[in-house]
Amino acid sequence: MHYVPLLWQDADVDALSTTLAECAKTAACETTPQACERRGPPARKSEPWYVQSCKDAYQHKKHVSQCPQSTVEQIKVAQTRHDSVTSTAKQIWMQRRHAELVEKSNKNSRHFWKVYRTKKRDSCLVSLPEQKEAFQTL
């Protein structure tokens, strides 16, 4: 422990620095919440096409980028490989999903369109009379 004499009493510098660091971290989290979020795999990890090969490529990229002996070229290769694996996995999943939907529509098209048809929705939440009234007040 380090103590600094003050006029009234001694101050514990270690405790004071810890308290100040926690205060600064709290202030940073309140002003920029994205700075306090844990950085991990991209949000797409919950996507159905983000399979184990994508996770492995991400882990490899993370390992290479954090390794102090890695060169810029190695980091770039790892990033390119991750992007390639991810886009390939997404493309394969999309092709399978498309084939599955086509097969379902060919078997029983009436049931298919009942299930997958999108409903018309009002894109504007404000009704037409309210819009007219708002424009007239302007």
Image: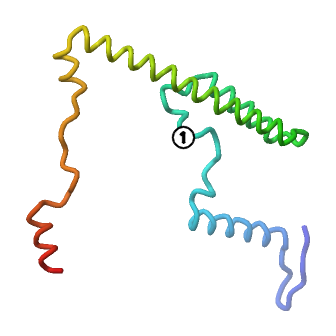
Is 28 rendered above or below residue 68?
Answer: below
Image spot of residue 112 (x, y percent): 22, 18
Camera-nearest residue between 55 and 137: 137
Image spot of residue 85 (x, y percent): 63, 26
Image spot of residue 134 (x, y percent): 15, 73
Camera-nearest residue between 90 and 40: 90
Toward the left, the furthest residue is 129
Q: Residue at x 21, y 55 (%)?
A: 124
Image spot of residue 83 (x, y percent): 64, 33
Camera-nearest residue between 50 and 14: 50
Q: Which residue is drawn at 73% across and 71% down?
A: 20
Camera-nearest residue between 46 and 113: 113
Disc 1 marks a residue whose amino acid type is: Ala
Q: Label 1's element?
A: helix
- Res 8 → quadrant: bottom right
Indicate left or right for 38 with 127 as reference.
right
Report crowding for label 1: few under 14, some 14 to 19, many 20 or more residues within 10 A (C-alpha): few
- Res 30 → quadrant: bottom right
- Res 35 → quadrant: bottom right
The tally of labels here is: 1
Toward the top, the furthest residue is 107
Is 25 rendered above or below residue 81?
Answer: below
Q: Quadrant of the N terminus?
A: bottom right
Q: Residue at x 75, y 30 (%)?
A: 60
Q: How is the image coloured?
A: rainbow
Residue hosting label 1? 43
Indicate left or right for 32 with 64 as reference.
left
Q: In which quarter of the image is the C terminus?
A: bottom left
Q: Residue at x 79, y 38 (%)?
A: 75
